[in-house]
Amino acid sequence: MEYQELYNSAIALLRSLIQVSSFSGEEEGTANLISNWLKNCGVTFHRQANNVWATNDHFDPSKPTILLNSHHDTVRPNKAYTNDPFQAFIDGDKLYGLGSNDAGGCLVSLLATFVYFYRKENLKYNLLIAATAEEENSGPNGISSLLPNLPSVDFALVGEPTEMQLAVAEKGLLVIDGYASGKAGHAAHHNTENAIYNALEDINWIRNYQFSKISDVLGPVRMSVTQIKAGQQHNQVPASCHFVIDVRVNEHYHNEEIYQYLNAHTHSELKARSFRLSSSSIPEDHPIVEAGIAMGYQTYGSPTLSDQALLSCPSLKMGPGVSARSHSANEFVLLSEIEEGIKGYIELLKKIIV
C-alpha cells in the first residue's frame, strides 16, 4: 500500500480503536480489531493474551531486528470530559477520543509503517511489530510477558507522542514505601517518639538531598514524597507513619543503587515496590538517531515513563502527538500529525534498512 491508502486505513483503524473500551487489563476488543486489521492487510500475525505481534514476510534470523512497539490500552477518562470519550469524532484536523493521542496515533502510524515494509525483500534489518497491552499500569500481561516469546531484538522504536522529535533517553521510576516507627502515647504527655516527627526527619533529608550525577538530557534524579498517612485521632501520638517516595531516575543510576543509598541514609524502614522500571537511553551516534537528526528532528530527554523501561535493548521513543495532551480531558490527535507520523517513520527507516 502507498502513503495515502495507508493513511486512510490507519485513520479508520484508530477511530475503531477509540470506540472500543480498552482500559489496562481489559484490551480484548482492541486486540481483536488490530488482529483483524493485520489479517485484512495480508499479514501473518501472532497473539499472546491481548498482545499482537508480527514479523516482516522475509524475516531472516541472520539479520538484526528492529522492534516497532506501541500500546493500545488507555487510562480511564477523567471527570472533566465534556465529549463522549468513545465517540471518535472529527472536527477539522482534530480526531477526538480516549487514547487518540496516547498512544493511538503512534500505534496506527507504526502499524501502517510495518505494512509498508512487510513484503519488501533484501532489507538490511528485520522488522518486528508489537501492539501491546497494559502499558498504562505497567501490568504483568503487557510487553514484559511478551518479550521472552519474541525474536531477539537489537533496538526498538517505541511509539509515544513526542511531536516526532527524538527522545533519546527516558527517566526510570522507583516507588518506595517508607515506614517510620515511634511509641504510641497520649498527646497531653511528653513523648519523644512521635512517628510523624521521625518520618519528617527522613522526609526533610529526601527533600534536600541531590544525587551528584546530572544527565545532559534528563537532568537530575528527582525525589518527591507524594503521600503520607499517620494517626487515628487528635489526642493520640501515633506509633507508625507511612509515606511514599516517587523517584525519577536518570540514566546514570540503577534503581537498586538509588534504593540502597536512601536506605543507608534514612531511619525509616524502606520497601521498594519494584526495581524493573529502569531509565533507558540510546547513544546519539546510533544509526536510527543519526538518521533522525539528518531529517531535521531534535533530540531530547523524556521525563515520562513508557514501555521503554521494560526493554533491555537500546530504544528510541518517537511518535506523532503531544505528550501534554495525554490523559487530558477531551483528548485529541491531529490528522495531520498522523500523516506526518507515517511518512516520518517510513522515511526514517528507509535511511537504515533499505
Image (cartoon, rainbow, N blue to C red):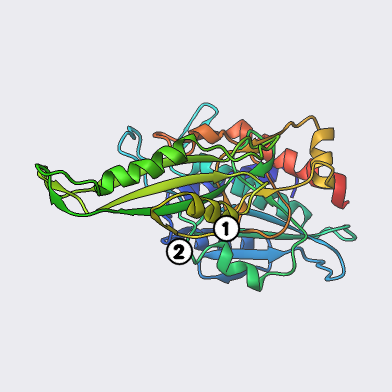
Dots 1 and 2: beta carbons under 8 Å?
A: no
Position of residue 145 relative to residue 173, above or below, is below
Residue designated by label 2: 28
Of 152 and 216, nearer the camera is 216
The percent position of residue 99, horizontal first and vertical second, equals 48, 44
Instruction: Name the residue type under label 1.
Output: Glu
For the point 76% across and 63% down, the residue is 56
For the point 45% across and 36% down, the residue is 207
Q: Is residue 352 left or right of residue 24?
A: right
Of 285 and 39, nearer the camera is 285
Label 1 neighbourhood size at 10 Å, few (<14), some (14-19), many (20+)? some
Q: Which mark is residue 58?
A: none
Is residue 86 at least partly visible in the picture?
no
Instruction: Name the residue type under label 2.
Output: Glu
Q: Is residue 288 left or right of residue 331?
A: right
Give whichever of discs 1 and 2 has the lower sequence position.
2
For the point 25% across and 49% down, the residue is 193
Of 330 and 261, nearer the camera is 261
The percent position of residue 183, horizontal first and vertical second, equals 21, 54
Q: Residue furthest top?
A: 92
Q: Is residue 173 left or right of residue 354?
A: left
Label 2 neighbourhood size at 10 Å, few (<14), some (14-19), many (20+)? some
Residue designated by label 1: 256
Front of the two marks 1 and 2: 1
The percent position of residue 96, horizontal first and vertical second, equals 46, 36
Of 234 and 189, nearer the camera is 189
For the point 55% across and 46% down, the residue is 305
* Label 1 – label 2 distance at C-alpha: 35 Å
Q: Quadrant of residue 302?
A: top right
